[in-house]
Image: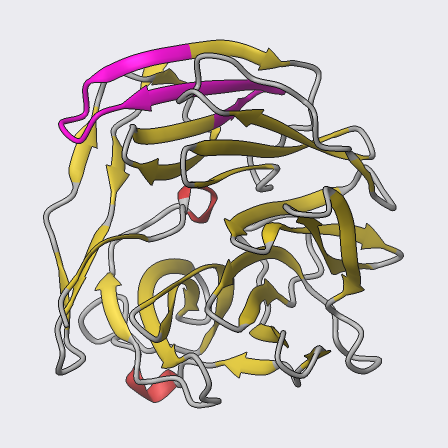
Amino acid sequence: MKKLFFLLIAIQFTIVGQVNWNTPSIVSNINVTENDRIESYTNSAGNHIAVNSNGTIKYYLINSSGQKIRENLNLDNGCEYSENNYTVAITGYENDVYIVYQKTNKIKILKSTNAGINWSNSIQERTIASTNCNGVDAVFDDRGLHVVWAVKIGDNFETYYERFNRNLLQWEGYKQITDYDANDIGGRPSVTTSENKVHVAYNMNTSEVTITISGPAKTRDYNFLTNSWEIPQWIEIEISRIPPPYPGGTVEFTCSNIERITYGGGYLHLINHQLISDGYNPYHYLYYKRRAVNSSNWETEILVSQDIVFPQRLVKPLLLQMEE
């Protein structure tokens, strides 16, 4: 086993719209392998971390200083696992925490009401169309648990959505997100919610490998006021704005590998992993983009890191502080 230094990225927003990246907190007391899938969720109890470790679902609770409060190293086993795919997610609402993950052709949900001490499977599992799944994500709000997943249908990945109504205690709103037209495909989805919308980001990648093949990215929103899914929106970064990977180099090709999306302060916030090519070699850049929640225009991106960042390690941004 190796020790993984797990970084919680904090974004601080100011009223003029500038974005400041704080120094990350480093957690060094969680034993995982370099290919384990890791996701996090934070509430008043601390930082809840879900891990898919070679098919075993693990849980850790750490405090704001990175100290481990508790762990459960065998919530479930025999689950689907790949170093290229996101098959575990964690979210919460008030004092409840939910771990959502793939096992065979099922999306399963574990729920804890006491900060990870006990877990139940009281929420009905969902059957998916294929065991070839390259992404699972979830978010909880006052409407319930919103879940997205992507499976391979034929030659392409397709993204799906459904929510568990917290009041009616039933699933509703099933939707294939990638059905806008015949060319609309995509996987590795990420989901968040705002006051009146659900927002799903997905990647038009047709491959099961993240590090070498990628595709353009989109978001698609569901509007609760109109009870309808809106037109997909492209997430684009122009080549002219991308710095070369080395002095004297050129950028011949770029497109998106993975996107992670969240909401706060009236904006959608997107962490975007771009594959950059000089025509011969791949490079990996990390970008931040945002758009007003009811707008169709993304603001100019901010380059977060030009170092090699493995796309398999990308987690959702964590909004820790909002300044009005």
User: Residue at coordinates 55% horizontally, 82% vertically from top-left?
Assistant: 234
Q: Position of residue 82 (x, y in %)?
A: 62, 32
Q: Position of residue 317 (x, y in %)?
A: 33, 53
State which quarter of the image contains the N terminus.
top left
Compared across the picture, whether 57 is left or right of 185 comes to: left
Camera-side residue of 196 and 182: 196
User: Residue at coordinates 40% horizontally, 29% vertically from top-left?
Assistant: 49
Q: Position of residue 184 (x, y in %)?
A: 75, 76
What is the span of residues highlighted in magenta in the rendered image?
51-71
Compared across the picture, whether 264 is left or right of 225 comes to: left
Magenta span includes 251: no
User: Residue at coordinates 30% horizontally, 24% vertically from top-left?
Assistant: 4
Camera-side residue of 57 and 70: 70
Magenta span includes 61: yes
Compared across the picture, whether 84 is left or right of 174 comes to: left
Magenta portion: prevailing SS class: strand
Q: Position of residue 79 (x, y in %)?
A: 69, 22
State which quarter of the image contains the C terminus.
bottom left
| Figure label count | 0
